[in-house]
Amino acid sequence: MEDTKRKVSNRLKRSEGQIRGVLKMLDEDKSCRDIVVQLSAIRSSIDRAIGVVVAENLIDCIEEESITQEDRDEKIKEAIDLVIKK
């Protein structure tokens, strides 16, 4: 779990730095294209952080021996719904 926290924290810190960079770009009147490229990178970084959280939580849940197959299936569906926004 500590490894997951570290991974997510590092990704979010990287995203935070990217956001600061975009704010600076706005102040410097950088091109719309460059700003959108950076915003897309931030979105990807956040999506990866979400993926790490969901995947690690799902692994922990599935490895739990006391959980029923029905509960496992529900947790898997829940994880998919978190990642894939309808």
Image: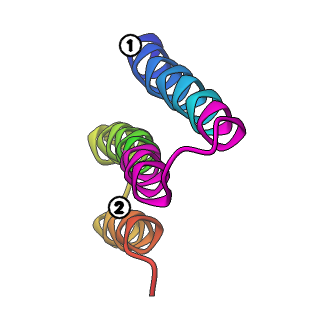
Which SS type dominates the magenta stretch?
helix
Q: Quadrant of residue 59?
A: top left
**Residue 24 horizontal/vertical position (percent):** 65, 31
Q: What distance separates the C-alpha of mark 1 from that of mark 2? A: 27 Å
Seen in the picture, residue 73 relative to 34 is either above or below; the reply is below
The residue most toward the right is: 27
Which residue does the image show at 44% across and 26% down from the upper left?
11
Q: Is residue 10 left or right of residue 63?
A: right
Label 1 environment density (alpha carbons within 10 Å; few <14, some 14–19, many ≥20) = few
Q: Which mark is residue 3?
A: 1
> Is residue 43 covered in magenta?
yes
- The residue carrying mark 2 is 68
**Residue 72 horizontal/vertical position (percent):** 33, 62
Q: Earlier in the sequence, mark 1 or mark 2?
A: 1
Q: Is residue 38 left or right of residue 69?
A: right
**Which residue range is magenta in the image?**
23-44
